[in-house]
Image: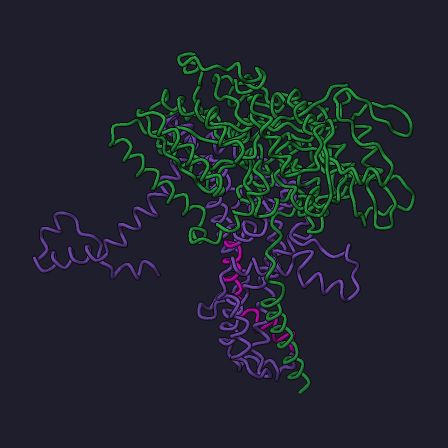
Amino acid sequence: MRNKRLLTVIGLLLIGSMLLAACGGGATPAPAAPAATEAPAATEPPAATEAPAAEPTATEEAMAEPTATEEAMAEPTEEVAAEPEATLTAEEQAAVASAAAAEAMAAAEASGKTAIRWFVGLGTGTDPQQIEAQQAVVDAFNASQDQIQLVLEVVPYDAGRDTLATQIASGAGPDIIGPVGWGGSNAFYGQWLDLTQYIEDTGFDTSVFDPALVDSYQTEEGQVGLPFAVFPAATYYIPAMFDEVGLEYPPQNYGDKYMLDGEEVDWNWDTFTEVAKRMTIDVNGFNSTEDGFDPTQIVQVGYSPQWQTHPNYVSSYVAGSADIVDGDAKGSYSVNMPDSWKEAVQWAYDGMYGDQPWMATGPMSGAPEFGNGNLFNTGHAAMAVTPLWYTCCLGDLRDSGTEFQAGILPMGADGVVHGRVDADTFRVWKGTKHPAEAFAVLSYLITDGGDTLLPNYGALPAIPDKQEAFFAKKSEDYPFITPETWEVFKAGLSYPDAPSAEQWQPNWNEAWAREQTFWDLIQNTAPDALDFDAEWQKMIDDLNVIYNK
Amino acid sequence: MFQELNRGTPALPTPRAYRELTPLKRREMREGLLFISPWLIGFLVFTLLPILASLAFSFMNMKITDGILSPPKFVGLDNYIQMAKDPQIWSIGGGTRGSLWITVLFGAISLPVGLMLPLFIALLMNSRHLKGKMAFRSAFYMPYIIPFVAAVFLWGGMLNPESGWINRALVAVGVPRDMTPNWANDVNWVYPTYVIMGIWAIGNAMLIFLAGLQGVPTDLYDAAKVDGANGWHSFWKITFPMISPVIFYNLVLGVVFLFQYFTVPLVVNQGTGRPGGATMFFNLYLYKTFFTFQNMSYGAAMAWLLFFLILVVTIILFRTARHWVYYAGDGKS
């Protein structure tokens, strides 16, 4: 009898647990990408500088490369998401878009024009409002002449890379691709047309751009792009937090000193670290340098390396950009990351797990109260270093009544400022049957078409004459931002990362993924469970293999 | 056995034999081929051809984005040689382990749970003391009917470190909030998390165990009872040997499933290998090599490695089976 009761109770308990499993908490989806580098909200637009290929999902990619588009764009996104098209998967939507484009191409060719297909889906440009603007540009271009018929093909960001890869593999690649950033371009390295001949043939005036920006598109395959949209980096900060602890704001002119404890000091990463520590506060109000500070109950961090999802970013900022690939052919490639890169990442690791932390660990920054990775936007970080596109994603901060400004980037140990300039542009596919016509379209998109496109992409024009309009628009979004802050961003254009932190590496997609895995590991693993040196070496060893696959 | 079965199966005749057939036989044969042709064509085009193609790809340097710009070249065993020294597959130690080791490590936790728990529940369900057996059986089997991806999302919600009711319950019973597990986001907790999610789908294994248990002759237990055997002896000396073929069957299926483990890390951690590369299972790495890293040839070589690994492990299991699996009808173990 007792056995019978016991069995019944155990059975009921088991079934009860199953029912609880079925009913409880299900409304909340699995933590979308756990790490500190989690994506911004789903409403945020896709990346301006396309996401690393290693991250196939929408959320991750959006996270890795937050978009340059404006906060305002998020609103229409939600509305349109409810339309019937949203019931299709990204791949299905891509198939529909491709079929429609193919039909339009056939019609254009039947009319005797040269059909040029413009593929959008590797970065920003997939929001309804942006699609509308792009279509307006297409219509304007088509109306401007009678030789070329431009056809727009917009593929959802989630399916963009796979769709493009499939098209290229089948020999049916588009003529123009973009906007696409460094990472997305490197994911399709070797596929871009050298524009040199067409620049010369058409007399395209490249002097409207900063020569350094033009050069940044020069590879061993030639001039494979031209500048279009740029995103210089700066130190974002929340003045109120500095006021609260009585610290000076970060300087706003490159070359200026910082006043710390009554002394003028360089605004370098050492100073930055000290300031960050003093602005990392626990639940009891102690900062990271004070006795009694509880690192398990941090309520505010001094620094958020916002969307620096790879060691490459951290190291580029702190130690300076470097050409990290040696060799010139499969079998000869090797990693050439300087020691200073490793030291920079170690510095960041100490910031998370050291005795006096000043950065959020992976679990902390991945928590909802810290914005699921979009930490600075929650008002729980005093400073963030990230490019201009981050102004896309600070609506929550603004709406909470918190103002932010931007200061200069700290200088490295070598006394030099190591900045970053992200960039989006359009590329011409090397396999296009109509390269001259494709170049004509590209010229239009980055000049006249850019007047319509850039505001919709939320991107700073690479052509200096057009930049004021951009900042005027930004000032409408963030009325509290001072002109000095915008000047900081402009000055940041003089500190590009060359080569880019997202520079080409052999088998870029896999290499980039491996580097992110390393960053994710150190973000999420405390020193008692991590041998930093060994893990760094393991990453290097893995990269050496990946490079030569 | 198969030879005996095949003995009664007519093979396709030679051309000469075909000519010697009566018109009726010829017609029957043509119609037979016609009726089987949909499956045959489907098999050839969608199964056999891709298998052969993947074998051919594995000896080439094909990358999808090379497309028409760079036709694939024959590279012999290069991909296999490269794979043999790929630390992302084989590496054992440290925080970022190789995908194969990750798979094996996870299997060391998930396989015992995946076998013992359904067996335990099946034993409960088979108890003559239990009332409402049908209801319990249905209830335990029911989750198996739920699409697995949906179930994974559901578990993800429950195990959400912040909003999931499991952590909330832990806090409610006094566990400090900062001590609650970070589940799928923590390198130390992610495997237990996946195992817990896997428990959802034990209904099928439980049912198979139950069928096995019900096939054990009750007179064996009666005889054991007369001989003074207690419950444990009865289980170990009678139940276990008698259901060992069922255990073996579930074990083989479990091993095959383990090597093909894919959906959970893809859905829960978006296939990124997070946290810290801990969920880059072999099959997921294979998938990413194909479709994200766009290295079709290397991915094809990995697929063939996976095939051989499963084959070898299965053969080993079958070899060991003769020592512990009891087939009552064979008169031998």
Asked if one can make out residue A544 in the rendered structure from this viewpoint, the answer is no
- The chain whose colour is green is A
Asked if one can make out residue B118 in the rendered structure from this viewpoint, the answer is yes
- The chain whose colour is purple is B
State the count of labels. Answer: 0
User: Which residue sits at x=53%, y=64%?
Assistant: B247
Q: Is residue A524 above or below residue B35?
A: above
Quarter in which the N terminus of chain B is drawn: bottom left
Q: In this view, does A13 lie above or below A149?
A: below
Q: Is residue B297 above or below residue B21?
A: above
Is B37 a magenta residue? Answer: no
Q: Is the magenta stretch mostly helix, strand or loop?
A: helix
Is B234 a magenta residue? Answer: yes
Q: Position of residue A52 (x, y in %)?
A: 56, 35
Left or right position of A188 against A349: left
Range of residues picked out in magenta? B231-257
